Image (tube, grey):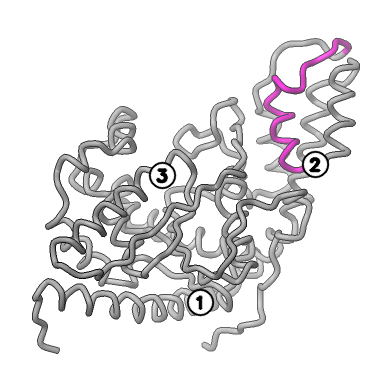
């Protein structure tokens, strides 16, 4: 089935989700790489924490490589049917939200076998002490994940993902900067070991404009905390989930502090500046309850994601299109990866007979 290039090209970039959003500006065209792990349903935190920035970079005309990190997901999911289903969900969701296969290379990590080959070769120059410093490994062990070699070696596979596409920039939040620094260390170590500038040394693209999105319990919105508001819910399901946002017991008639309210923090992400100012005034004046605020938040979420939800429903009815997009993206990604690996093998003296 041919990939219909003009289909599903809309996005939320110009919609109400991005009032005043600019983000860091890059002055020249760069190659950008980011992976998304299929470990759960897409939620509001995913959009404001990553997808919005991905769409901006795509719109600016950069060479964007966005992939579904299903090998990485194996560190926490050992259920074949669930992983396959979550990978399909993520692919469909990102296309619905505006990732455009005509402007970005969108693919599955597992469709580029060269990345695991590079991971091994990076392992051979990687000090164990470097992996022992990984904050994310320590954090995940503290949260009860099994201390597997996959989890321990996660940063090296991540480095291979970045380096194999000659990436210049890697969009990350401040908390993920260490992984890019490790990638830089490994690229430099490999280049020094073999006496040539074989691998491009990337730079972190710190998403300073990333909003901290609270979950329904007030903690950072995360699948790990089961506190998310998922994007592709029905309007009724969204209303039910928003109703579960934790608030204090201030009576309806009393004044409230908008800056201490989880609902208001989410309203800031969806409403424009004028409405935020108006809502803050209502909070402080009294007579405006948390139920009113939750009702308005529900309306805003449903309005903002309505176009993406409609596209999502269309895509669910056309799974062949999604598969074709990933197949074509995988082909493009493999071409770049194989060119990198040819340099790497040659530098390391790895002889192949093909």
Residue ID at (46%, 74%): 326
Q: Nearer the viewer, mark 3 or mark 1?
A: 3
Secondary element under disc 3, as helix, strand or loop, is: helix
The local crowd at label 3, few if under 14, some if 14 to 19, many if 20 or more residues have their Cα within 10 Å, is some
Q: Which residues are magenta?
A: 253-270
Sequence-wise, which precedes: disc 2 or disc 1?
2
Question: Circle 2 sits on which residue?
Answer: 271
Instruction: Give the numbered dot on residue 46.
Output: none
Q: Are marks 2 and 3 in contact (CB under 8 Å)?
A: no
* Eye-nearest disc, 2 or 1: 2
With 50 as the anchor, is 284 left or right in this view?
A: right
- The verdict on residue 256 being magenta is yes
In this figure, which residue is indicated by the disc labeled 1? 325
- Which residue is pictured at 12% across the width and 71% down the height? 348
Question: Where does residue 131 sit, x and y in percent of width and height?
Answer: 21, 42
Which marked residue is nearer to the observer: mark 2 or mark 3? 3
Residue depicted at x 59% and y 64%: 27
Q: Position of residue 184 (x, y in %)?
A: 31, 54
Q: Earlier in the sequence, mark 3 or mark 1?
A: 3
Magenta-span inclusion, residue 343: no
How many tags in the picture? Answer: 3
The quadrant of the picture occupied by the C terminus is bottom left
Q: Residue 177: which numbered mark, if any?
A: 3
| Mark 2 or mark 3, earlier in chain | 3
Name the secondary structure under disc 1.
helix
In the visual, does 142 lie left or right of 253? left
Q: Is residue 169 above or below residue 238?
A: below
350 up-or-down from 84: above or below: below
Does residue 21 appear in the picture of this structure? yes
Q: CA distance from mark 2 to mark 1?
A: 33 Å
């Amino acid at each position: 089935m041919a990939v219909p290039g003009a289909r599903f090209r809309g996005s939320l970039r110009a919609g109400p989700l991005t009032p005043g959003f600019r983000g860091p500006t890059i002055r020249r065209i760069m190659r950008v790489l980011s992976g998304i792990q299929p470990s759960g349903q897409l939620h509001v935190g995913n959009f404001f924490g990553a997808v919005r920035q991905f769409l901006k970079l795509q719109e600016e005309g950069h060479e964007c490589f966005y992939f579904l990190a299903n090998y990485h997901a194996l560190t926490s999911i050992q259920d074949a049917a669930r992983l396959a289903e979550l990978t399909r969900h993520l692919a469909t969701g990102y296309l619905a939200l505006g990732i455009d296969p005509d402007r970005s290379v969108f693919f599955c990590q597992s469709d580029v076998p060269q990345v695991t080959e590079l991971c091994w070769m990076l392992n051979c120059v990687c000090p164990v002490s470097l992996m022992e410093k990984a904050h994310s490994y320590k954090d995940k062990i503290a949260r009860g994940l099994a201390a597997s070699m996959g989890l321990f070696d996660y940063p090296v596979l991540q480095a291979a993902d970045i380096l194999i596409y000659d990436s210049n920039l890697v969009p990350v939040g401040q908390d993920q900067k260490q992984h890019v620094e490790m990638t830089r260390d490994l690229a430099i170590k490999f280049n020094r070991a073999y006496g040539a500038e074989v691998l491009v040394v990337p730079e972190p693209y710190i998403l300073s404009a990333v909003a901290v999105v609270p979950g329904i319990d007030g903690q950072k919105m995360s699948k790990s905390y089961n506190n998310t508001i998922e994007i592709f819910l029905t309007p009724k399901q969204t209303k039910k989930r928003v109703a579960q946002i934790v608030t204090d017991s201030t009576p309806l008639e009393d004044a409230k502090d908008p800056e201490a309210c989880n609902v208001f923090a989410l309203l800031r992400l969806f409403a424009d500046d004028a409405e935020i100012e108006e809502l803050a005034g209502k909070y402080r004046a009294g007579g405006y309850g948390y139920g009113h605020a939750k009702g308005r938040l529900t309306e805003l979420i449903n309005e903002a994601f309505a176009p993406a939800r409609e596209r999502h429903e269309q895509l669910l009815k056309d799974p062949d299109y999604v598969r074709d997009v990933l197949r074509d993206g995988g082909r493009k990604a493999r071409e770049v990866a194989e060119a990198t690996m040819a340099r790497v093998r040659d530098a390391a003296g790895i002889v192949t007979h093909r």
